[in-house]
Image (cartoon, coloured by chain):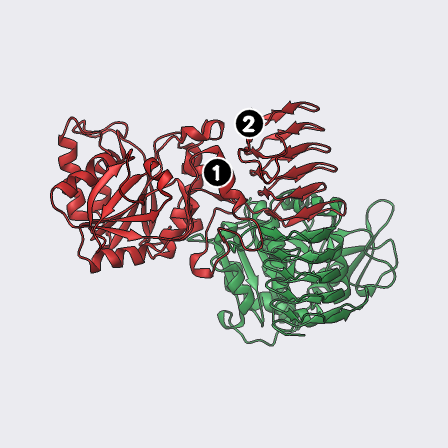
Chain colours: A green, B red
Amino acid sequence: MNVMGIIFANDGEIGELTNKRTTASVPFGGRYRQVDFHLANLTAAGVRHIGIISRHNYQSLMHHIGSGEEWGLELGEGGLEFLTPYSMSTTDNYRGKLETLYSAMDFLEFGPQDDYVIMTGSAIQSNMDMKKLLEAHVASGKDITVVTKAGIANGAKQLDLAVKLDAKGEIADMAVDYVAPEGYLASMDIFVLSKDWLIKQVKECVAHNLYHMDRDLVLGLWQKGQASVNVYQFTGVAMYNESVEEYFANSLALIDSEVYHNVFGGHHTIYTKVRDRVPSYYGEECEIDNCVVSDGCMLDGEVKNSVLFRQVTICAGAEVENCVIMNDSVVGEGAKLKNVILDKNVTVAPGAKLIGTKNNPIIIKRGESV
Amino acid sequence: MYFQKKRAIAMLLAGGQGSRLKVLTEKTAKPAVPFGGKYRIIDFPLSNCVNSGIDTVGILTQYQPLELNEYIGNGQPWGLNKTHSCAQVLPPYERHDKKSGWYKGTANAIYQNIDFIERFDPEYVVILSGDHIYKMDYAAMIDYHEKNNASCTIAVRTVPIEEASRFGILNTNPDNTIYEFEEKPKQPKSTNASMGIYVFNWSVLKDALINDEEDPDSSNDFGKNIIPTLLNAGHKMMAYNFDGYWKDVGTIDSLWEANMELLGKEPEFNIRGDERSKIYARNNALPSSYIDAKAKTANCFIAEGTEVYGTVKHSIISVGCSVGEGALVEDSVVMPGVVIESGAIVRHAILGENSKVCKNAVVGGAYGPTDKKKKISVTSKGAVVEANTVLLPGDML
């Protein structure tokens, strides 16, 4: 049973963090990019043929993934393929995933050995056993499996695709772009389908001017009775990073022993690009409480309840609380930061004061000095 | 198969037992001993090679090679897996002419791999060992060797005169040519100690190795045989002065010291350095560390994948360890995968890979800064210090 993987790198936006990068290459969890979680989920299930569909801003993503050797994907055949607009048959004007898939038809049709396709977005992070998922899909005998998570629908968050099950576990309702009340299951933007069926449906949809994956393929075909849908409920931690607020809250949620172990110590190891930084140095006077800390940091100040990426410097007398600080950023002496996201390579001047709120953290853009 | 001609290749002697590291090298060759939180000793010479533009390294293994072989693998972490680069593990093998078997000495190990070296037709061969912690640009040494038109160049460093009789001492003329080599002299004439790093013209070394093998009385050793013989034959031999950090980590005490010398605001050995002198290591793919609210950390290195709930002071905590609530780790080297349970106290110790200190156990003792002789307690790979027990200062388990 061979499976190919497709990762959509551009879907969703996380405010300023995706101004110059794809959703897939947004740094998350101290040393990772979001795409690492998806590559790990797929490769741990034995998927060795993965396409990454990226429409724009993909330079940082390509730099991160390179030949894919960190994930064991630097293979002669199959392996990893970047599907960028220029490598596909048409231009950048895709209205939805179905058109994107249509223009990546060469990739889909190549490799007749693949029986199934697992498609995933890149905004929702998890450590998922996709072998189990695939087995569940095959056992269901349905056309599409939609992976869902309970407890996300809250009557306030708009869900791309929401499903409600009745007492017998049958689908009672399905809705797209819907502010679903509690009790609905939220799609994790992960689908399993047979490859032949997917190719057929993509061609059909595009021929009829339909392009929206959730609305036209899943909901549309289900409503018309042309597709049977299996709902798979994921029970582990699922982090929906679909806005700055969610990204910030989820980053800080990792600083909880239980969540940390579920995401990082779960089903499989998460690989990322190796940077060969030295271990982090904790200075004589530093005060580090409740933090996730990556390699290469120099810590002399006070840091509470924060996530530090690689090679971060916190100078003496600095106070950092509830912050996400990305690679190579420096917090100067005596600076005070609360509820702040520093993108990569930011310099905070000595004595500077940045105070955001939990729901509205201050974001300092990559490379800036404040 | 096509082999590109190389200006220089390196041969890394990694077969020694390292018996003075006692329980730490019972099941592991010395070059594979963990160092500095995420490295192994061999990462230093290997990374130096890569940073010096040497892309072909033969690694001679003999003693307990399993872990070392596994670690080196295809050489990918050091970028030595490309079309024209390699990290080739060279274990002893059986030859058609029976001139083979276990490596009898350092020179014999190279002799048995003449065929490997010949494939690259190198001008120069750099001989290295896997026993030392240092950063060095071998390319500068090769340039020096070439400029001086020497047959052999030996890296030297100045040691205190009272320690000189522990080393191979090179006596030199004012122009740095060597006129005499003395192995561990009782009455040293100079303080130029050999660092065991040699650059040879391959043609000269090859002849010397073949001749040395013919001599039944030779112990087939570079220091004892090859160097004195070449000197007596009138070859031009140069000393190359190196004054950077260099540490032989062949004993428990020196291994502990070298780890401690990474610490501090201005450490004796700054392992960070710049991009061009970066030390590469095989990566463990572990998540970022987790530092709990109850944790206290001061003057320490903590590598990735480690969880700290207790107190860590003046110590190296390697990848994938955990320090439990209320535990204290002070002045210690904690190797990868070690578990220190709650309430345990670890001081002046080296805890071997995957060893475990159970609840409320005590390992090692406290010393003041003026205490000269600190006895280091050591746990071997996978050892378990049972709950509520004591491992005395200087004891090994």
- Report if residue A235 is visible in the image: no
Rounded to the nearest angstrom, the CA distance separating label 2 from label 1 is 14 Å
Q: Nearer the viewer, residue B282 or B44?
A: B44
Q: Position of residue B22 (x, y in %)?
A: 46, 27
Which label number is shown at residue A164?
none
Q: Is residue A252 left or right of residue B386?
A: right
Question: Is label 2 in a helix, a strand or a loop?
Answer: loop
Task: Give the number of marks.
Answer: 2
Relative to A306, say whether B350 is above or below.
Answer: above
**Chain of the residue where label 2 is placed in the rendered structure:** B
Q: Quadrant of the N terminus of chain A?
A: top right
Q: Which residue is mark 2?
A: B394
Q: Which residue is mark 1?
A: B255
Q: Position of residue A112 (x, y in %)?
A: 49, 53
**Residue B277 quadrant:** bottom left
Q: Secondary structure at mark 1?
A: helix
Q: Earlier in the sequence, mark 2 or mark 1?
A: 1
Identify which amino acid the numbered label 2 is placed on. Gly
Tag in front: 2 or 1: 2
B284 to B84, vertically: above or below: above
Residue A9: x %, y % from top left = 61, 64
Can I make out residue A165 in this image? yes
Q: Amino acid at mark 1?
A: Leu
**Is A132 placed above or below A276 here?**
above
Residue under mark 1: which chain is it in? B
Q: Considering depth in this image, is B289 or A54 the residue closer to the camera?
A: B289
Location of the C terminus of chain A (image quadrant) = bottom right
Nearer to us in this view, A132 or B353: B353
Q: How many residues crowd around disc 2 within 10 Å: few (fewer than 14), some, or many (20 or more)? A: some
**Residue pictured at 58% horizontal, 71% vertical:** A55
Q: Are marks 2 and 1 on the same chain?
A: yes
